[in-house]
Amino acid sequence: MAKSSGKQSKDKDAKDRESKQSDATLRKALLIAVPIVLAFAIFFVVVLPSLSVPFSTFKSNYLAGRRVAVVASYTDQNQSGVVLQCATQLVQIVAHTRNASTIDFYVLNGTMCTYPIGGLGHQVSLATNTIQNCVSMADAEPSVFLNYSAGNSTGITPYRLYVNGDAQYMARCPIAVDLS
């Protein structure tokens, strides 16, 4: 009987150790899984909706902004004409609904940025800066980024519109019509 009792005690100890190991493994899995699930939930509830929104949301925010920006971006002089033509059309359309002095206009040529100090609508005094600094200034307000690109695409967030287009797209400049 003592042998049987000893064997039962060893079996019970083994089961207890196995149960504790299982509980520890479950706790570790939960410690890993819970933050991952929370990260996904935050991404899908908070981040993802801000990455892509309907154009009407951007347009409403853009037109209601205290100041707005138009950013024309190209990498060589061959691309500059069509991008600047589209940017000019866009500025003219936007200026119909707001004071031009509240429109900031940045030209990024691949190596530096040129912009009128204090926006448009008065005597223009140009400044130059790094591309990174100009993008940061444009990011501080609702902005349209016109980028010369081999392919055409559009990215929309609540306060940013990224229009990538080739020469034909920039020559048509449909975004100017869309914002009118």
Image (cartoon, rainbow, N blue to C red):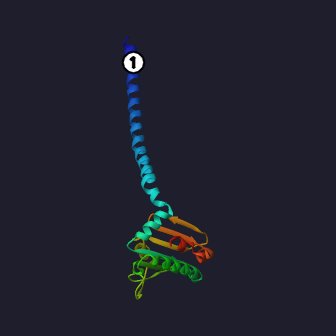
Residue 67 placement: quadrant: bottom left
Q: Is residue 92 above or below residue 32?
A: below
Q: 80 or 12, which lies in front?
A: 80
Q: Is residue 89 left or right of residue 13?
A: right
Q: Is residue 175 above or below residue 9?
A: below
Screen quadrant of the N terminus: top left
Q: 44 or 175, which lies in front?
A: 175
| Residue for point 44% across, 66% down | 60
| Residue for point 37% across, 25% down | 13
Name the residue that disc number 1 marks. 8
Residue flagged by tag 1: what amino acid is it?
Gln
Q: Is residue 33 above or below residue 171?
A: above
Tell me where residue 150 appears, x and y as whole percent: 61, 72
Residue 109 visible in the displayed image: no
Tell me where residue 109 appears, x and y as whole percent: 51, 80
Residue 94 visible in the displayed image: yes
Counting labels gives: 1
Tell me where residue 44 appears, x and y as whole percent: 46, 52
Q: 29 or 103, which lies in front?
A: 103
Question: Label 1: few (<14), some or many (≥20) within 10 Å?
Answer: few
| Residue for point 47% across, 67% down | 59
Q: Secondary structure at mark 1?
A: helix
Tell me where residue 90 appears, x and y as whole percent: 51, 77
